[in-house]
Image: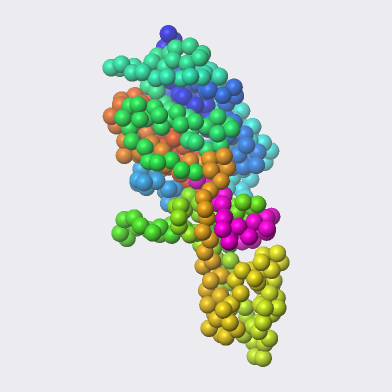
Amino acid sequence: MREFDVIVLGAGAAGLMCASVAGQRERSVALLEHNTQSGRKILISGGGRCNFTNIHTAPDRYLSANPHFIKSALALYQPAHFLELVERYGIAWHEKTLGQLFCDHSARQILDMLLAECERGKVELILNARNIAVERDSTTFRVSSSQGEFRCGALVVATGGLSIPKLGATSFAYDLARQFGLRIIDPRPALVPLVLGSEEASWTALSGVSTEVVAWAEASSGKPNRQPPPRFREKMLVTHRGLSGPAILQASSYWKPGEPIYIDLAPQFAKDNRLFAPLFETNARRDSQAFRQALRAILPQRLANHLAVAATPAGWTNAALEATEQEFRRYAFHPTGTEGYEKAEVTAGGIDTRDLQARTMESRSVPGLYFIGEAVDVTGHLGGYNFQWAWASAVAAANSL
């Protein structure tokens, strides 16, 4: 039985960060990872360049059943703090659209940086630690695994959610939380492509078509005066199964099965501008061919051709054309589902934040037990926000160990 002050379960973004900070605070730390390598999700993120934070990080960029919970951690560890660490290691970076920060070269630089920080903190990294089980007596935790048995006073769970199972994602964090009596907000795939069926399956013939849209879901129920879900102006991509692209991934986090998702197909036009202006000109020709030409002026050709058939006006009167314009501003899709955890960038839901201390991530009912990162019911928007939550929640826990 080996003894440590702290054991961190999961050597992903949050686990590596927490272990390194705790180790540098002169705690003896063991970091257990069930995969044969650490940081697998870091390595594939951002197309291999790791979108490691977002300069616009703020509480309103996160989804949680308890939106106030995230404020403390995000305030205590901000994007500038992580950027300072990145620059200390000489990692070149650049800002893309909407405040997203990426490595110039490789996501491996971020992983190597975190591993170096763990080394500075004398963290013992134990890979291939499978069949992990946890027991607790009055003051300590006992962790058994295929790599031996360990004892600690503080246990940090950073094993993530259910997204991308091929990288080793499991329900371990939720199972352990239930073992110790913590509540779970039902997990679901988030930042995930949507699947179209029935008549809308015809859209899949447009696979590869991309266009800028505004996408949003609408909450059909909830608390009175609740803020409506946000709208996302980014690219939409039609796939062989349905809809994807940043705008759709963003809206998917707010979408509920059985409900529609809405698209403004022409966000580049002001609301009082006519999309089909040529058809309203004096003596203008009004028929399906003229309608198709008007669409081609504002949309990619394949998409215009499809909509010329799928959204033909009920007639050629001013009222019919105006009604079609309104439909284009609020085009409804009815997804049959999502592409699931295999394609989801993150998992929404998770450990109920009502059972955790906001400043420390410690369980309210089990002293010494902490949950951080994606395992917690905090889901960021696309674009580096989930990494920032990983860093911030990790540091909040580490500073209290």
Q: Identify which residue is drawn at 68% across, 86% down.
A: 285
In-image side of 400 versus 167 (left or right) = left
Q: Is residue 173 above or below residue 99?
A: above
Where does the image place residue 52, in percent across and percent down from the top left? 56, 40
Observer-nearest of 355 and 22: 355
> Is residue 145 shown in magenta?
no
Where, quadrant-wise, is the C terminus in this rendering? top left
| Stretch of the chain drawn in magenta | 190-212
> Is residue 210 shown in magenta?
yes
Which residue appears farthest toward the bottom when viewing the image?
283
User: How many discs mark residues in the rendered view?
Assistant: 0
Observer-nearest of 203 and 249: 203
Where does the image place residue 389, in percent across and percent down from the top left? 47, 40
- Coloration of the structure image: rainbow
Where does the image place residue 272, in percent across and percent down from the top left? 53, 77
Where, quadrant-wise, is the N terminus in this rendering? top left
Task: Please say whether residue 303 is visible from this viewpoint.
Answer: yes
Q: Identify which residue is drawn at 49% across, 31% down.
A: 170
In-image side of 89 versus 150 (left or right) = right
Question: Which quadrant of the figure has residue 6?
Answer: top left
Question: Which quadrant of the figure has residue 300?
Answer: bottom right
Which residue appears farthest toward the front when viewing the image?
198
Question: Which quadrant of the figure has residue 302?
Answer: bottom right
Q: Is residue 246 above or below residue 125?
A: below
Q: Identify which residue is drawn at 47% across, 16% down.
A: 145
Q: Identify which residue is drawn at 70% across, 78% down.
A: 289
Where does the image place residue 16, in percent across and percent down from the top left? 51, 28
Observer-nearest of 325 and 373: 325
In-image side of 288 versus 221 (left or right) = right
Observer-nearest of 219 and 359: 219
Task: Please say whether residue 98 is visible from this viewpoint.
Answer: no
